[in-house]
Image (cartoon, rainbow, N blue to C red):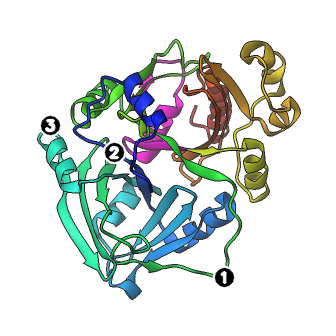
Amino acid sequence: MNTVKDNSSLQLEKIFPDAEDFLPLNGTDYVELYVGNAKQAAHYYKTAFGFQDLAYGGLETGLKDRASYVLQQDKIRLVLTTPLEKGGPINEHLAKHGDGVKVVALWVDDATKSWEETTKRGAKSFMEPVRDEDENGYVVRSGIHTYGDTVHIFVERSNYNGIFLPGYKPLNSEYQPSTTGLKYIDHMVGNVGWNEMNKWIEFYAKVMGFAQLVSFDDKDISTEYTALMSKVMTNGNGRIKFPINEPAEGKKKSQVEEYLDFYNGAGVQHIAVATDDIVKTVVEMKSRGVEFLHVPSNYYDDILERVGEIEEDLAPLKELGILIDRDDEGYLLQLFTKPVSDRPTLFFEIIQRKGAKSFGKGNFKALFEAIEREQELRGTL
């Protein structure tokens, strides 16, 4: 990974002058999910999403309490972790939340300084700086708590040449399905409780030096039945973007309320992953069993009048249910999976940006009506 700032990064820093540089972030290092059966979850993400083996940590590598499978696709690293013993924090997390994101790890140049800067600004420490080493060098990690039971771990790996982290070995199985064209994490969305959004916006501003990129209220994100509020926080170079959602009053239970009920608290709602060819990616993922939300065909009746000319043929977009939106910088294409576990909690967004820097505001109504149809089937609307 290249830590040299390119022109686009410098431009983004000018766009977000309120973001402070006491916590320079190079990007997302990995996302760790606690799951009930990591071996089977790894098979699912390989088969359905096109991730490939990278590393393994478990009894064979000296980890006694857990097994972790590390998967990679381009710049995206997923860590799937399951407990090997009764009791303990991983089991507690699973019993409370089901499968879900525990760690959003951030790649930094100095994990010790990152911990010091954030904790002195009010962050609750999750892990003091620790240095782990093996024959491939050393890694320094530290961590802080954020909303719910989610944590950020700062990873400093400039002096490490191993496959992932000390305690892991390369993982190479005979089963290596091809990728689906996923490139990197575009953004990650957190759901928090009633009237908690501004608290966490202030946390990311004060503790991590982020700036607010955009805000949506219940007039922007509402249907006949449900509503929610959202604000998007970004770091200075724009590589890390965290939208934060909270419920808003509506006639029926919103998707955020449903998430909070089944996740038993705040947590990561969805991971948005970027592709350079959304049609190809979605066709491939659907053929592998990934289920996506359905958008009625009448969404496309006047779509080109609303978003203007696009490069893509509209027919395959309509057939796949891919949403389109435009801002001052360009347009974007996006589609959302159904929840990837039995609890209606975590899901994924597939996004292709054609210049647009926004988050699909023009699609909110169609998207949330699609989610409401799924809620109605579940009896949770």
The kind of residue on which mark 3 rests is Arg
The kind of residue on which mark 1 rests is Glu
How far across and how far down the image is residue 240, in percent?
41, 40
Helix, strand or loop for disc 1: loop
Distance of label 3 from label 2 (alpha carbons): 17 Å
Circle nearer the viewer, 3 or 2: 2
**Up-down relation of residue 56 to residue 81 (above or below):** below
- Give 87 or 106, whichever is nearer the viewer: 106
How far across and how far down the image is residue 38, in percent?
50, 70
- Asked whether the viewer can see residue 204, the reply is yes
Magenta extent: 244-272
User: Is 254 colored magenta in this rendering?
Assistant: yes
- Give 173 or 161, whichever is nearer the viewer: 161
User: Which residue, given by chain and number where applicable, does mark 1 sit on?
Assistant: 174
User: Is 110 colored magenta in this rendering?
Assistant: no
Distance of label 3 from label 1 (alpha carbons): 48 Å
User: Which residue, given by chain and number where applicable, does mark 2 sit on?
Assistant: 25
User: Which residue, given by chain and number where applicable, does mark 3 sit on?
Assistant: 121
- Give 184 or 36, whichever is nearer the viewer: 184
Q: Residue at x 60, y 16 (%)?
A: 328
